[in-house]
Amino acid sequence: MPTSDPTPRPLARRALRTTAVVMTTLVFGALGFIQPASADVVLGGHAVGGKIGEAYLGSGGVFKWGVPTSDERAAAKGGRYQTFARDVTFYWHPSADGGNAHQVGGAIRQRWQAAGSERGPLGFPVTNEFKAGSGRANDFTGGSICWSKTGGAQIVWGGILQKWRATGAAGGYYGVPLGGEYRVGSRFAQDFANGTIFWP
């Protein structure tokens, strides 16, 4: 997994999340978007709460993701999801990343959906979208999707993913993926900006 993305320390992350929750509550309470008696935040007529609300508010809330465009709904395999105005959906599953919710959006979400979303082999997201070399990526329980201007959104998984991560993933020697996995005789291969990875 790429390590170039700086992650705040847990204490700082909690402080940022708390600040975001307080600010959003104050601003939207003043504007009349929030129903004070509810444990959830109500924005644009849709409640946001639980682990999805935590992740949404803690990562920028309405200022980054816009208002919700749906209520929280059931996802496959016992998960939950909710969509937001700025082309993003937050997904949660109790066994994915310790029960934390994560966002998936844009071209990465489109590629994930084409592969079956949470029902498919990639499963649920375990990270938010992050900077990955010259592109952006999300990690999932079953692999990674990396998007770049040169390669578009590509899935990397299995033995090739392990080799790619061992060299620094998108920020390392091979760089971003340029296409999907394909067969070469009895082996699998995938092309990257700076070379091809084979498995086994």
Image (tube, helix red, strand yellow):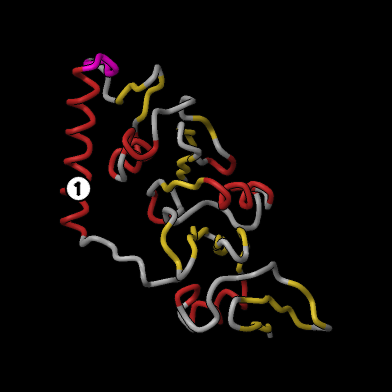
In the image, 131 versus 90, the foreground residue is 131
Relative depth, front residue between 141 and 90: 90
Residue bearing mark 1: 16
Tell me what residue is drawn at x 28 percent, y 43 percent: 58
Image coordinates of residue 180 in percent, x first then y, are 69, 67
What residue range appears in magenta? 31-36
Q: Is residue 105 magenta?
A: no
Image location of residue 106, percent across then percent down: 54, 46
Split into 4 quadrants, where in the image is the N terminus? bottom left
- Viewer-proximal residue, 150 or 44? 150
Answer with left or right where residue 106 lies relative to residue 59.
right
**Depth order, front residue of 96/157:** 157
Question: Residue visible at 59% across and 41% down?
Answer: 76
Quarter of the image for residue 46 reads top left
- Left or right of 11? Residue 140 is right
SS state under label 1? helix
Residue at 66% across, 82% down: 196
Residue sitting at 41 percent across and 56 percent down? 97
74 lies left or right of 11: right
Secondary structure mostly seen in magenta is loop
Type of the residue with mark 1: Leu
67 w.r.t. 90: above or below: above
